[in-house]
Image: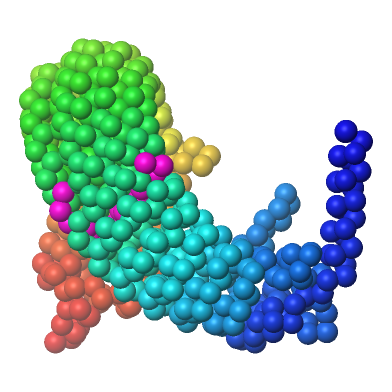
Amino acid sequence: MAIYTYSSKLLLLRSFTFFYYCIACHRTDRSALLAFKASITTDPLGLLESWDHTTDCCREWAGIACDPATGRVVNLTRPGLTSGADFVTDASLVGILSPAIGSLSHLRVLDLTNLKRLTGTIPPSLGRLSHLTDLLLSSNDLTGHIPASLSRLRHLRRLFLNSNRLSGHIPSSIFSSKSLIQLALFENQLTGGIPESIGRLEFLEKLDCHANLLAGPIPDSIGSLHRLTHLDLSDNQIRGSIPSSIGNLTSLIVLDLYKNDLAGSIPASISGMFSLQFCRLSYNRLTGRLPKSIGYLPRIQKLVLENNAISGEIPSSIGGLTTLCDIFLANNRLTGKIPSSIGKLKNLQTLDLARNHISGPIPHEFANLHNLQSLDLCYNLIRFTSLPAWLGEMSIYRLMLSHTGIMGPLPEWLRLASSISALDLSNNHISGELPFWIGNMTGLTFLNLSRNAIRSTIPNEFKNLGMLMDLDLSYNNLYGPLLPVLTKGVSEALGQYKTLDVSRNDFTGGIDESIGDLAAMEVVEILDFSYNPLGGRIPESMAKLSALKEVRLANDGLLGEIPDGLLDLQELTEFDVSGNELTGRIPRHEAPLPAVGFSGNAGLCGDPLPPCGL
């Protein structure tokens, strides 16, 4: 029996081979393909170069596959982006999508993705391709409406029209193709609502309509899509509430409704989505309390609910989300204390509760969060008297505690917190000195201690912060020379300042003449030394800091002239030296710098101030 089967397969293979070489491309299909080629005006990499009327389209035309028994074209695949083990090809076509493609009556796959400059409308004639299973036209420059004729494609499984400039409503008839598994309409200019008929797509697994102009509510029929695994309606103008039927989506893994106009509360039925791993409902107008049922999502990994108006306390049931890695609840109206049950979330890496009305203290169970990397409690009513020492025993990478009522000196345990890369303790009541052991925090890339009451010089050990790129020490009582800040070390790839703000202190001793040659200053973009009694002159070498975008040196007691070249830096958009004792002509500049940035210097003249010599 096995020998018979093998012989039969071999005979069948030989028969197909015979047909393959003997059945030539059907003349109707050849004409349709040549008409498509004729509609292309530019083909830089020769995607259609082999399409020659003297050769057989089934055997010799790139991107064409035929049924060997009939010679009818079944696949037309000329995507712009292709890759292999050792190559990537990125091609394009300039022209329109010819209606003649509608004559390829046996076509199953049409893939013209990523051709970038394919323009015009989607021809309604594509609705005649009754055998089509894959219609892939994404990442082009197509315009106009989605033709209603696509509803006749009863075998269609994948419809990718994303990343074009399509407009108009989504035709409700398009959801007549019950065989659809994937529908991608994102990154277009589609308007109107999501048709109620979407509930007919019983086999749909992925629906992505993000980055359009869709409005209206989410239809209740969405709950009928029991096989749906991915739902992305983000970055639209969808209104109304989240329908409770959404809880019927038991297969859903990804739910993204970010940046819409959704209101009302999160439905308690959310617990029905027990496959959910990613949930993003941020940047809406959601209100009400977090439902207790939100703690019954057994597979959730990322929960993003920030920038809404959610109120009430965080339910203790949230401690049941043992798979949760990241939770973002910032910019809401949450009150009460942080539930101690959060300490059970042993996979938690990010906890962001910033800008709420949460009160302290932090539960000591947080010490169990050994995988926590980012903790943001900024702008809450924590009212720390001091930072808990057990924070120093964790491996936190990002610690943001601005405006949480911290008092007293910087805690000693920070000297051992080598894992911290970003530290924000601004807008508190920290006093005492900037300790020498700050130089032990060699992992710091971001440090904000602004708006406190720290009073001291900058310790020499500050030079050890070789990875620091963003520093804000403004609004303190720091004094002495700036040199330790400017001459700090840099590491191999990091450590050059991007932003440096030491304004509103008592620094003296002028700006170092070699500032433009210092390694730490080479790529600085924002420089703010304003409101310090620095004195001295603006160094000529500052004109070497070619990345500067914003320079603020107001009320620094500066003398002399503004160096040539400083105002002509290509990236410069803001320059403020007001309230000094500068003199001379303001150097030429292309940027439209306002006069207010030069005011209060009696000896300055020239554009944008009155001309010199008047």
- Measured as percent of width and height from the top left, residue 11 is found at 90, 51
Residue numbers of the magenta segment: 226-241
Quarter of the view holding residue 330: top left
Residue 368 versus residue 4: which sits nearer the camera?
A: 4
Residue 599 versus residue 269: which sits nearer the camera?
A: 269
Residue 392 versus residue 88: which sits nearer the camera?
A: 88
Quadrant the C terminus occupies: bottom left
Residue 116 versus residue 528: which sits nearer the camera?
A: 116
- Measured as percent of width and height from the top left, residue 75 is found at 66, 65
Up-down: is 227 above or below 112?
above
- The residue at the point 37 percent across, 41 percent down is 226
Up-down: is 204 above or below 75?
above
- Measured as percent of width and height from the top left, residue 140 is found at 50, 71
Tell me, yes or no, if residue 486 can be seen here.
no
What is the magenta segment's predominant secondary structure?
loop
Quarter of the view holding residue 484: top left
- Measured as percent of width and height from the top left, residue 26 is found at 75, 77
- The residue at the point 88 percent across, 70 percent down is 22
Residue 236 drawn in magenta = yes
Residue 49 drawn in magenta = no
- The residue at the point 10 percent across, 67 percent down is 600
- The residue at the point 17 percent across, 78 percent down is 609
Quadrant the N terminus occupies: top right
